[in-house]
Structures are given as C-alpha cells and as structure tokens.
Amino acid sequence: MRFYFFRLESLFSGTNFELIWNTAFGFFQQEINQFKFLGVLICKRVKNNTMEPDFFTAFAQPSALHHSPLKNDVVQGEKRKFINPTSCNNPKLKELQMLLMDWINTTLKQEHIVVKSLEEDLFDGLILHHLLEKLGSLRLDVEKIALTEKKQKHKLAVILEAVAQCLQLEESQLKWSVDSIFQKDLLSTLYLLIAIAKHFQPDLPIPSNISVEVIIIERTLTGLRTENAVEYITENRENLEGQSKADAFDELFTHAPDKLDAVKKVLLQFVNKHVGKLGLNVKDADSQFADGVILLLLIGQLGGYFLNLREFFLNPNCATEMLHNVNLAVALLTDGGLLDFPVNAEDIVNRDMKTTLQVLYCLYSKYKTKET
C-alpha cells in the first residue's frame, strides 16, 4: 500500500490529478463496496444486539444470515415443529402478523420502538421486556441490553418465566420455549404474543380460524421421522360450534331425559336405513356400537367407500380390538371434517350413551338427506 501511495502522491502535483484519482478509485472500487457492505452489516448487528464474535463469517457466507430450521439440528429424542414455508404466504397469517406488529408498535410508540419482523426483532427478549413493562408494569431483574448470546438467552428465560407465572400457565400448556423463541421460530413467537395479547388486552381483535401447515421433525433411534399437520394458531370457531353440539346433548341428558328416547329412535332409523343393505339391523343403541364394527361400516356406507377388512377387526374378541375399531372410526370422522369436538374412544367402548349419540348425530347432521 505504501508503494501505491508514494506513486500517487508523486503524481498529485501534476495537471492529471483528476484523471489519476478516478483511475485509483476505480482500481479499489471492489474493496470499497465490500467495506460498505460490512459497515451496513455491523450497524444492523449492533442495532439488533446480535454482535456475535464470529460475525465476520457472515460476510464470506451471506446465506448464514438467513435462519431456517435444519433437520441436522434435531437431537436424539427431540421433536421440533415449525411452519411449512408454503403457509408463510397465507394472507390470513400475514394479516395476523401485521395486527400483532401494529399492536406492539402502538404500545411502545413513546419508546420509539418499531417492530418490522416478529421473529427477527423479538428473539433476544429486548422488546418483550419493554412490552411486559408497559402492559403489566412488570419489573424484571434483567439487563436492559444484553450483548452476548449467553446473556440474551438468560434474559429471555427470565422473561418467559415471568409470562408463564403472570398468565398462570403450567409448563405442559406452553406452546413456546426459550430455544424456539431464540431460534426465531415464527410459530412459537406467534403463540407467545397471542397469549400475552389475550391476557393484557383481551379486546384486541385477533382474527379466528387462522390455521397453518406445520412440519414436525423427530429424531428417533431409526432416524428422522417427519409428518405434516394442520394447526390452528388462533381460536377455532368451528370447534366452538362443535362444542355447542356437545353441550346440547349435556342439556338433553340433564334437563330433558323424556326426549331421549325420541332422539334415539330418529338416530336408529337413520342408521338402519344405511346399514340395512348390508343385512344389519341395530336395535340397541346402548350396546351395538361399542365394538366399533357397525360404526365403521356405517361410515363407509355414508362416505361411499369400502373399508379394507385388514384395517379393523370384524369380530373383535377383546376390549383392545374394540378400542382399535372405535379409534379408527373417530380418526375417519375427524379427517373427514365430521367430528368437530374431542371424543374419547374408550367412552364408546364402555357404552357411554351420550358420547355414542353425539357421534351418531354428527353423521346424521351431514347425511340425513342422503338416499340409500
């Protein structure tokens, strides 16, 4: 560098200064642009309090800036769940994110805090700390600004423990953890913010029925096991409607037992109308559905498909085989969107009349106009 500086300096006295300067600037243009990029990167890291000791590696590997759940991160016996990338463009999900960001920004407006990304801006606990202090007047014994990863995780752990205590949640009820929030997991971050909002600002108009596709990864002794599922992030109104049906049967059994026989009669007529072509006839609703066989055959008839006889026990000989049949029936009803409230299969096996009638009523509601 001294050589170049000497040569340039010796030429500055001439009339070609401007030409030489432009030539030198072009010669070092690539290095100048790299330092500009590095400067922006450092500023962002300082702003977000994520100044790792090895941050220079991000300059050599830009892809390291983008965090995503990796299968290799899952350890033995661990189960990890995250939103399927295909769901990230869901308009309802984006609407929910905007609502929560606007809520946080409005709440912390006087502190000049602006959140632009939920998972990126909240992972270290800094903004969560401000939010809890503002909403709940909570005073937490943690540093305002934590610069190292160790201190950030400690701070986040203290904050999340305070949230659980304030919301009176048991550990089994938590849908987030220190690791998932710190790893910038959007699903966990959404669950946390929704829980905080419902507790401190119940009038916040959080939209209902927002569901996402999730990927569940579990490392077992035989390797990685993955499965896809649909999960509701916000309140499922359809489930509430299903629960109201269950409540209606509670009301029937408690306050109108005189009408119970009439309900049984209607449901048995419906069942026999569709299983009659199989040579079956149900006379006793209290016992004939307990082994799950007629229930499975009825579901197949109504759904227009034949159940593989290898999938269930046509002549169950024990409670285990009966429970297998009923569990299969419940799974088919749930997958078909017919069963919108939780059902304990053991109740049907144990001849619980209320549960049995609830399940039959779901089928009746869907197929009462279906011709045989």
Image (cartoon, rainbow, N blue to C red):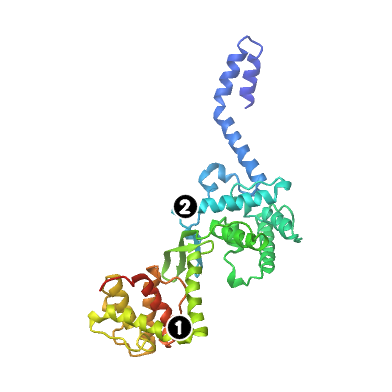
Task: Tell how many labels.
Answer: 2
Which residue corresponds to the image point at 59% horizontal and 51% vertical from the top-left? 99
Q: Residue most toward the top?
A: 15
Q: CA distance from mark 1 to mark 2?
A: 39 Å
Considering only vertical position in the picture, is 241 above or below 270?
above
Q: Position of residue 12 (x, y in %)?
A: 65, 14
Residue 120 left/right relative to 362 = right
Give the numbered dot on residue 231.
Answer: none
Marks 1, 2: nearer the viewer: 1
Task: Tell me what residue is drawn at x 55 percent, y 47 percent.
Answer: 65
- Mark 1 surroundings within 10 Å by alpha-carbon count, few (fewer than 14), some (14 through 19), many (20 or more): some
Q: Position of residue 291 (x, y in %)?
A: 35, 86
Quick one: label 1 or label 2, which is nearer the N terminus? Answer: 2
- Lateral position of residue 29 relative to residue 348, left or right: right
Residue that label 1 marks: 354
Instruction: Looking at the picture, tell me which residue is in the foreground, 345 or 288.
Output: 288
Which of the 4 image quarters holds residue 328? bottom left
**What is the quadrant of the N terminus in the image?**
top right
Report the residue marked by disc 2: 90
Q: Secondary structure at mark 2?
A: loop
On the rendered image, what quadrant is the C terminus found in?
bottom left
Please name whichever residue, 98 or 268, is drawn nearer the observer in this view of the structure: 268
Q: Amino acid at mark 2?
A: Asn
Give above or below for 145 relative to 353: above
User: 70 and 7: which one is in front?
Assistant: 70
Quadrant in which residue 171 is drawn: bottom right
Q: Amino acid at mark 1?
A: Lys
Asked whether 170 or 334 is in front, the reply is: 334
Return the x and y of residue 42 as percentages of the image width and height. Answer: 64, 41
- Tell me if mark 2 has few (under 14), some (14-19) or many (20+) residues whose alpha carbon lies within 10 angstroms of its own: few
Residue 203: percent from the left, percent from the top? 64, 59
**Residue 275 visible in the picture:** yes
